[in-house]
């Protein structure tokens, strides 16, 4: 990897893209599927996409572990979307349905939802259980947004 290059995993096709130093991440498109790499909204992921995103992206990846039956998860969704609008491309925002992907939830010992984890290069930087409003969420994420 050249100095300053950034690897970003495409939320649409899962391809890993190397963005050269000095290039604007916000305008970057996938070299494989040509979709924007950032759209200012969280991307839903399955187990395979989750593993690629947290393992291959050079930027922090924030994952909202949630389920459709969870009232607090739905209440926090607009705050998570607002954080994605404001903090991408400094961070990637993902949503993982714990009902559809129980093995991933088990891997990280998710006992209560919503549960947020910030990853970088596959390692957990921070974890927070419970719903947050947009300002609290952005304040919690600020140290990781570079």
Image (cartoon, rainbow, N blue to C red):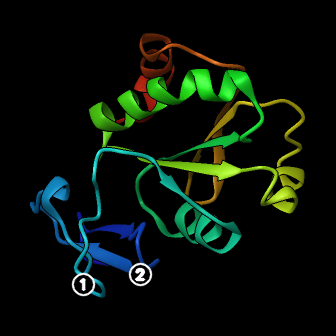
Q: Residues within 10 Å of mark 2 (few under 14, many from 20)?
A: some
Q: Where on the picture, by quarter, is residue 118? A: top right
Please report the residue visible at 66 percent of the width from the left and 29 percent of the height from the top.
Answer: 73
Please report the residue visible at 24 percent of the width from the left and 84 percent of the height from the top.
Answer: 31
Are circles 2 and 1 on residues that touch, CB within 8 Å? yes
Task: Give the alpha-carbon distance from disc 2 to disc 1, as whole Å.
Answer: 8 Å
Examine the rendered structure and indicate whether residue 73 appears above or below residue 39.
above
Report the front residue among 124 and 130.
Answer: 130
Position in image of residue 6 (x %, y %): 30, 65
- The disc label shown at residue 19, or none: none
Question: In the visual, does 137 lie left or right of 101?
Answer: left
Position in image of residue 10 (x %, y %): 38, 71
Q: Where on the picture, by quarter, is residue 84? A: top left
Please report the residue visible at 70 percent of the width from the left and 40 percent of the height from the top.
Answer: 66
Q: Residues within 10 Å of mark 1 (few under 14, many from 20)?
A: some
Return the residue at label 2: 15
Examine the rendered structure and indicate whether residue 102 appears above or below residue 74.
below
Question: In the visual, does 111 lie left or right of 62?
Answer: right
Examine the rendered structure and indicate whether residue 119 appears above or below residue 1.
above
Question: In the visual, does 59 lie left or right of 94?
Answer: left
* Quarter of the picture holding the N terminus: bottom left
> What kind of element bears circle 1?
loop
Q: Earlier in the sequence, mark 2 or mark 1?
A: 2
* Quarter of the picture holding the C terminus: top left
- The disc label shown at residue 31, or none: 1
């Amino acid at each position: 990897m050249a100095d300053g290059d950034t690897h970003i995993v495409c939320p649409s096709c899962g391809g890993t893209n190397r963005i050269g130093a000095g290039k604007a991440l916000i305008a970057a498109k996938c070299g494989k599927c040509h979709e924007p790499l950032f759209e200012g909204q969280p991307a839903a992921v399955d187990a395979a996409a989750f593993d690629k995103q947290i393992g291959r992206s050079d930027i922090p990846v924030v994952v909202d572990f949630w389920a459709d039956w969870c009232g607090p998860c739905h209440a926090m969704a607009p705050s998570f979307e607002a954080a994605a609008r404001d903090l991408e491309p400094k961070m990637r925002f993902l949503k993982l349905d714990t009902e559809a992907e129980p093995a991933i939830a088990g891997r990280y010992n998710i006992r209560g939802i919503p549960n947020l984890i910030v990853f970088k290069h596959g390692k957990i930087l921070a974890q927070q259980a419970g719903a947050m409003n947009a300002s609290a969420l952005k304040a919690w994420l600020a140290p990781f947004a570079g």
